[in-house]
Amino acid sequence: MVANAVLTDTEPVIEVGACSECFTPMRTEVISFLGRRLDYAVLCECCQRRLTSEREAEEARNRAGRLAKAFDAMCPPLYRESDPQRLAGAFLRESEAWEFSPEGLGFIGAAGTGKTRCAWRLLRRLHFAGRRVYGLTATAYAKACADQFHDAPEVKAGAEAVLGRCRRVEVLLLDDMGKQRFTERAEMELFALLEERTGNLLPTIWTANAEKGDLKKMLSPDRAEPLIRRLVEFTKVVRGEDK
Ligand SMILES: Nc1ncnc2c1ncn2[C@@H]1O[C@H](COP(=O)(O)OP(=O)(O)OP(=O)(O)O)[C@@H](O)[C@H]1O
Ligand SMILES: [Mg+2]
Ligand SMILES: [Zn+2]
């Protein structure tokens, strides 16, 4: 790199070196420390720009890879990819139009009308846009409510992690509400969860299959009203068109 040193009367000492990437000749400053010359790589402006954009592209690829891995870890394989052509209707429209706000979405409709697929497509979009999201079935939620008191420490810890995520994530999906009857414990937990999330202005997205009876059937008569009120009041309820 040392070539044609141009010594001036005063510091700094400038010499003609070369870009360490493309070897284009360029003027560089000689830097000395305690009388010893320090070697350092110099880059022309063009190479500097290129290396910066290469590094940024690499970082973007790594970030996309991490996001994809995290998404696959929470989304069941069946719902990771959906073809929107096969998902016409209100659920697709509303899930594509939804932007983050405290008002969630509730999908009510017959079996096989794409409620779960549209909900996961929405979660995917939000997740890749950097939102913290989490989704699970109401059955899995109820199981976590029971398992937090499990004797096996790893089961207990797993359940606590699930319930913590449900409380904290920016967008939560509770899929298939009403599929099974909730225990009193699960009902109370769900009530507290919805209270906490709505209080913190965190939206919840839920789906329920209308064919199998309404949400009431899953809940005890005295607690059904306040729970359903919380579910409905803080979500935009979308009813599916018949297939
Ligand atoms: N790869 C795909 N992309 C888009 N739609 C698909 C794909 N594979 C299957 N489907 C359609 O998705 C429908 C099922 O979607 P989904 O599971 O979201 O329904 P759902 O409303 O949640 O049903 P359920 O009430 O039983 O939970 C099927 O009827 C099928 O036509
Ligand atoms: Mg479903
Ligand atoms: Zn260069």
Image (cartoon, grey):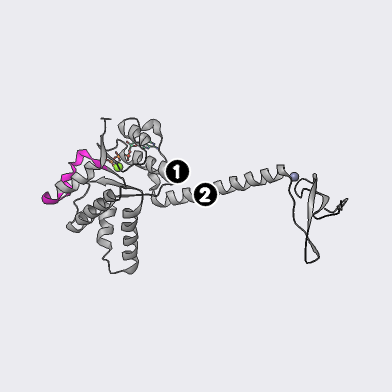
Q: Residue at x 42, y 46 (%)?
A: 127
Q: Is residue 175 left or right of residue 122?
A: left
From this view, report whether residue 35 is shown above or below residue 178: below
Q: Using the image as rendered, state which of residue 18 and residue 223 is in the foreground.
A: 18
Q: Is mark 1 within 8 Å of ligand 1?
A: no
User: Could you classify mark 2 by the number of other residues whose Cα lies within 10 Å: few (under 14), some (14-19), or many (20 or more)?
Assistant: few
Q: Amino acid at mark 2?
A: Arg
Q: Give coordinates of residue 210: x percent, y percent.
A: 21, 38
Q: Earlier in the sequence, mark 2 or mark 1?
A: 2
Residue 107 can be seen in this image: no
User: Could you classify mark 1 by the number of other residues whose Cα lies within 10 Å: few (under 14), some (14-19), or many (20 or more)?
Assistant: few
Q: Is residue 221 magenta?
A: yes
Q: Is residue 122 left or right of residue 46?
A: left
Q: Quadrant of residue 101?
A: top left
Q: State the residue position of label 1.
A: 129
State the residue lying farthest toward the left: 222
Q: Residue at x 36, y 34 (%)?
A: 97
From this view, report whether residue 92 is shown above or below residue 28: above
Q: Give coordinates of residue 148: x percent, y percent.
A: 28, 63
**Splitting the image into four quadrants, where does ligand 1 fall?**
top left
Q: Is residue 199 left or right of residue 56?
A: left
Q: Amino acid at mark 1?
A: Ala
Q: Which mark is residue 63?
A: 2
Q: Quadrant of residue 102?
A: top left
Q: Residue at x 26, y 57 (%)?
A: 143
Q: Which contiguous range is marked in magenta?
A: 207-223
Q: Using the image as rendered, state which of residue 210 and residue 14 is in the foreground.
A: 14
Mark 2 to mark 1 CA distance (whole Å): 11 Å
